[in-house]
Image (cartoon, helix red, strand yellow):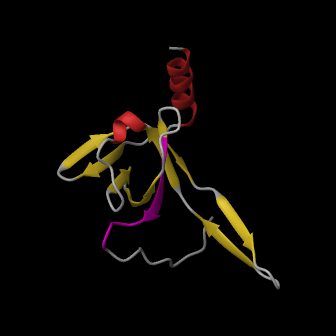
Amino acid sequence: MRMKTVDRQVDRQFAEQQPVFLLIDSERRPVTGIFESPDASMKISGGGEIEDCAPAFSLYTADMKGLKKRHQILMGTESWWVTHVGSDEAGRTRVRLANGEPGKPAPVIDSWSK
């Protein structure tokens, strides 16, 4: 019971304030979760570095029943699709995302990030 109390506190602090929906088959399921956009860099032997950013969404495992790779997630007006579903980690699961809609080209990048 104490873990559920802690989870609710984490949600209040970090969960997305905008509506988030999982699109699973014909269902549009509202969920609570935490969007992550961590930066990572990798050194290449012989010199060089690769910069990468793998966005993810962490949510309650029970809320994501039926979610699979290539399903769509809507966060406010932004569309994402699932590239990997992680394993259950004490009642939460981390899902890696790609920007855009499954099966459609990614949006054109025409300006620098701010």
Q: Residue 82: horizontal and vertical position, in percent?
A: 40, 59
From this viewpoint, which residue is outermost toward the left? Answer: 26
Residue located 30% across and 72% down the image: 103
Regarding residue 16, the answer to whether it shows in the image is no
Judge from the rendering whether residue 27 lies leftward or rightward of residue 54; answer left or right: left
Q: Is residue 60 above or below residue 38?
A: above
Q: Main secondary structure of the magenta part?
A: strand
Picture quarter containing residue 32? top left
Q: Is residue 80 above or below residue 67?
A: below
Residue located 35% across and 52% down the image: 74
From this viewpoint, which residue is outermost toward the front? Answer: 87
Reply yes or no: does residue 14 show up in magenta: no
Q: Residue 54: horizontal and vertical position, in percent?
A: 56, 62
Q: Residue 42: horizontal and vertical position, in percent?
A: 72, 70
Regarding residue 92, the answer to whether it shows in the image is yes
Reply yes or no: does residue 97 show up in magenta: yes
Q: Which residues are magenta?
A: 93-103
Where the C terminus falls, by quadrant? bottom right
Q: Residue 62: horizontal and vertical position, in percent?
A: 37, 34
Residue located 50% across and 14% down the image: 1
From this viewpoint, which residue is outermost toward the top? Answer: 1
Judge from the rendering whether residue 39 lies leftward or rightward of residue 2; answer left or right: right
Residue located 60% across and 73% down the image: 112
Total labels drawn: 0
From this viewpoint, which residue is outermost toward the bottom? Answer: 46
